[in-house]
Image (cartoon, rainbow, N blue to C red):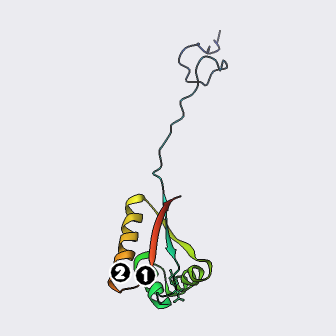
Amino acid sequence: MPLRPMMTSENDNGTGSDPSILTKAKPRTQRPPLYKVLLLNDDYTPMEFVVHILERFFGMNHAQAFEIMLTVHKKGLAVVGVFSFEVAETKVAQVMDFARRHQHPLQCTMEKE
Ligand code: TYC
């Protein structure tokens, strides 16, 4: 005579019918936090210089770079990319250093997403 498999009360990993006994352990993977890199408008940095920055450090084509530059110019700032902490920090440093070496007051910052 065939026997129906019986659910035991122990260690069914939460798949049994009594929720008070065990709850299934959800595998929780931790994603690293992401950081937005922001470019700020100013009255002095030439538009073409900003376009060049966006092409050089953020891998944009000319049309994308021009569009984002115009957004910053009109709105005061724009997110130019989202990265891990280390990559965002490097991008900000590269932009700030490049602008400073060319004596433009361009500002670039990062914030947690
Ligand atoms: N406002 C600048 C100008 O009129 C252009 C500019 C755009 C400057 C974006 C900074 O992040 C910036 N020359």
Q: As drawn, which residue projects farthest toward the left?
A: 101
Numbered marks: total:
2
Q: What element carries label 1?
A: loop
Q: Quadrant of residue 56?
A: bottom left
- Mark 2: is the Cβ under 8 angstroms from ligand 1? no
Q: Is residue 28 above or below residue 58?
A: above
For the point 65% across and 9% down, the residue is 1
Numbered badge on residue 60:
none
The one nearer the camera, 48 or 25, is 48
Residue at image coords 48%, 88%: 44
Near-viewer residue (15 or 38): 38
Look at label 2 and name its amino acid.
Arg
Query: Looking at the image, which residue is at 38% across and 75% down?
Result: 96
Question: Residue 106 location in percent, x, y?
Answer: 44, 80
- The CA span between labels 1 and 2 is 7 Å
In this orientation, which residue lies closer to the viewer: 92 or 2? 92
- The residue at the far top in this view is 1
Give the residue at mark 1.
Answer: 105
Mark 2, residue position: 100
Percent x, y of residue 67: 57, 83
Crowding at dot 1, Cα within 10 Å, few <14 / some 14-19 / many 20+, comes out as some
Label 2: element kind: helix
Please tell me which of labels 1 and 2 falls first in the chain. 2
Q: What residue type is labelled 1?
A: Pro
x, y (%) of residue 28?
50, 39
Whether the residue carrying mark 1 lies under 8 Å from ligand 1 is answered with no
